[in-house]
Image: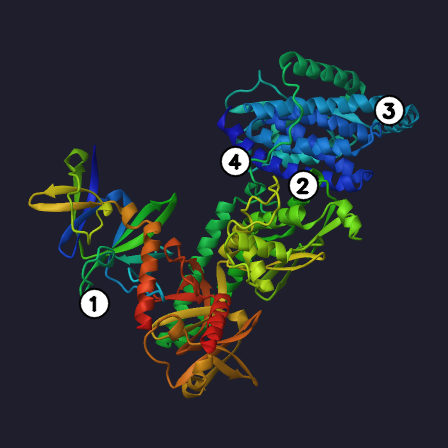
Amino acid sequence: MDPILQKFRAKFIEEAYQLLDQLEQTLLELEQNPHQSDLIHAAFRAMHTLKGTSSMYGFESMSEFTHQLESIYQRIRENNLSLDKNIIEISLKSVDHLRQLLNDEHLNQPENKNNHSALLKEILSLEITQNITETPKNTHQENDLSENKTSSEHTYQILLRTDEQLFFRGINLINIFKELAEKGDFYIEHLKNMSSNEVDWWNVVYTTRATEEEIRDTLMFIEDNCFVSRLSEENLFQVIDHPHAALEEKTILQYIEGNHPDDAAPTQPVKNNKPATNHATRRIAVDSDKLDQLMYLVSELITINSQLTISVNEKNLPRLEQQLEKLDSLAKQFRNNALELRLVPLAEIILRFQRLIRDLSRQLQKKIKLVTHGVETELDKSTIDQLYEPLMHIIRNCIDHGIESPQIRKQKGKSEEGVITITASHTGNQIVITVEDDGCGIDHEKVRRKAVEKGIWPESYKPTEKEIFDLIFMPGFSTAQSLTAVSGRGVGMDVVLKKIQDLRGNIEVRSQREKGTCFTISLQQSMSILDTLLFSVENQYFIVPITDIAVCEQMLYSHIEARERTSTIAFRNQLIPCINLRKVLHISGNYPTKVKVIVINHPQGQIALLADRIVGEHQAVLKPLGNMLRNQRYITAASEMGNGNIAFLIDIGELFHSQTQTTVQSITI
Amino acid sequence: MSHTYLSFSIHGELFAIKVTNVLEVLQKQPITQVPNAPNYIRGIINFRGEVVPVFETRVRFHFPPRPEEDSYVIIVLDLSDNDTLLRMGAIVDRVKDVINIEEADIKPVPPMSKEFNTDFLQGIYKQGDDFIMLLNIEKVFSSAEMHTLAETANQNSAIVAEG
């Protein structure tokens, strides 16, 4: 195949994944509302586009397969076939299979080959079995109707030439064919005799009720590459289609039975070898490498801007200040815009879970409904991609261990259908995602016994609720009574914790016996660029997110020293924990007599940090500290300031956690 | 088969690493200290927009500490550690030479003092009157080794802090 077509193919594969995602979503909705005709049309259109374009790019087996599937939906559309659970089931399996075909178009993998023939057989049998049951009266009426419709349908021929030029002009043929598919049916054939290395010719037969002018409008961008002519005043497909389709069915059946007599294996569920996270998320049609490159440039710009601000302030150059302010505000806007480009609604991944929940609940014979709130909340694309796996683990756990079987639920007086609720919201710089089930909750006693068995706790130990919940995230700890294929391999929750920590987030679990379990994940909204407050202790610079700061004050160090034993500070009529950064970070020297106190809001309460000097606002481009320094407890990232210095981002959560705990301990000692 | 090596000196001893690992040699420059970092990490620097940790090889090789005023250079290296690419700076006294070494000319490592971990060495090469120790940098800077080192370092510092 020539390189031009190769480039188109890459584009096609990308779009085909998106089409399949859409189709899957439509099918899942159809499962809930099998009679909603616009959904049936949408499913049909997606298949139709897929069929046409796949054959165009040489995915013959895919095109053939989609054709069979499409004809089922064609009949459903014409009310010649009623959409039942079985059809949806087969369609969903087909979607999985089609995804595989995108990687393996020639069916080289035996597994795919078996699936292919087995699924085709199932699809064909659908038509045959339901053919008998269909009511003749209904068909009759429908035929009348469709005849009325066809009267205004015409058939056109479009001769299309594709070449390098077309590609370099950035023409997206798939969109054009999508548009054509919305208004009619088409059939594409590659004219091999006319094609050469540089140019490919295609014969497109198109039936539609649209006028020739409308067709030309659709083809506007590729006007010079195609010749449109009217073949007939009627729908030629309608006239030929049925005998034609019957013929095709026959040849395919022959193909299956003749060539692969031993392949009668039942359809196996198609394994998704490729995790769905690899697919480009729907709303971003830009190569994500380009986006990363943009982000890199933005971060360099911000860094230079911050350096410039620091130098100008140091050198006291009032004449430059005005321009600098403008530059600063422009850079900020640019940054926010660039960051926004990377924002993707959480719904992008949540929708994928619908399928998971559906399949798993069937497998385990449970009834489970997914309810979502606030999934339009937007997150950075890379965060979303990294969230997929932990969220999937949590949901699997909810399905497998949380929600009980319908019988047991009934006995307990719950409704047979379990509910998994995913809620997302954001407050300030924090994004909070909760996954909640109304299942059996965590059995404290079971966890405790397991911990005793494993030698983690002595028999007599009475753990607190928090200790029990913490144990769930320990590597190799699983309370599943028997190992199932779904979860409970003993890996999972510790991986979830690690993934969330990698995102600089937190995860907490709450659970009530027989009421359910709730996982709460909190994340920083932006991962890479942050508005921060820059301050120093001795010669070291630190930053904290500016949105987290309650107030900055100056105090006499002698006042603070008096409370040193308890490590607290009096702030607005109450005592809050006070962190001596010199002590915690082992920095030499002493605090000045007038010490700066930075009070920070934290979900668990306020906390004060002691600093020598407050430098000011700093737009920080955060850089990871890398593998070698990953054992760092209180600092999570670094940011360049000007003059070669590097400031460290303080992890308030960790500081709060460990320091307040150790303080409590030191008091008891 | 021959490879090109960069030779450098640390406390009078000559070492060499393959140039394919070397990105750049930097002059002495301010290094930002990292609070609570293990003692063999001198700090971090900004290298081409990236935060790169800088190692004090003298600590790693149990040589006497470097006097503050002494000059040094930082060799920025890329190495693979458990399939991940690791970028780091190594502080050495000075860079000597770029040499081509035939594989056949590399001699095995002789028994050495227990102070020096011979796993760090890939072999010995004799150049004139000098013996150059060819470093196995993956071993010297592997994160697993580092972490055990970090733990002992932290324990030591904890003991020091308590004492």
Residue for badge 3 = A133
Q: Do tag 1 and tag 3 residues touch (Cβ < 8 Å)? A: no
> Going by the picture, which residue comes out furthest to the left?
B129
Q: Secondary structure at mark 4?
A: helix
Split into 4 quadrants, where in the image is the C terminus of chain A?
A: bottom left
Does label 2 or label 4 sit earlier along the sequence?
4
How far across and down, in percent of the image, does residue A624 sit?
42, 57
Q: Which mark is residue B82?
A: none
User: Residues at marks 4 and 1, common chain?
Assistant: no
Q: Chain of mark 3?
A: A
- Estimate how packed mark 4 is, as few (under 14), some (14 to 19) or many (20 or more) residues with alpha carbons within 10 Å: few
> Going by the picture, which residue comes out furthest to the right?
A137
Q: Do tag 2 and tag 4 residues touch (Cβ < 8 Å)? A: no
Does label 4 or label 3 sit earlier along the sequence?
3
How far across and down, in percent of the image, does residue A98 sit?
63, 30
- A29 vs A353, nearest the viewer: A353
Above or below for B69 versus B132 = below
Residue for badge 2 = A360
Cα separation, mark 3 vs mark 2, equals 31 Å
Cα separation, mark 1 vs mark 3, equals 92 Å
Horizontal side of B91 relative to A241 (left or right) equals left
Residue for badge 4 = A168
How far across and down, in percent of the image, does residue A652 sit?
49, 68
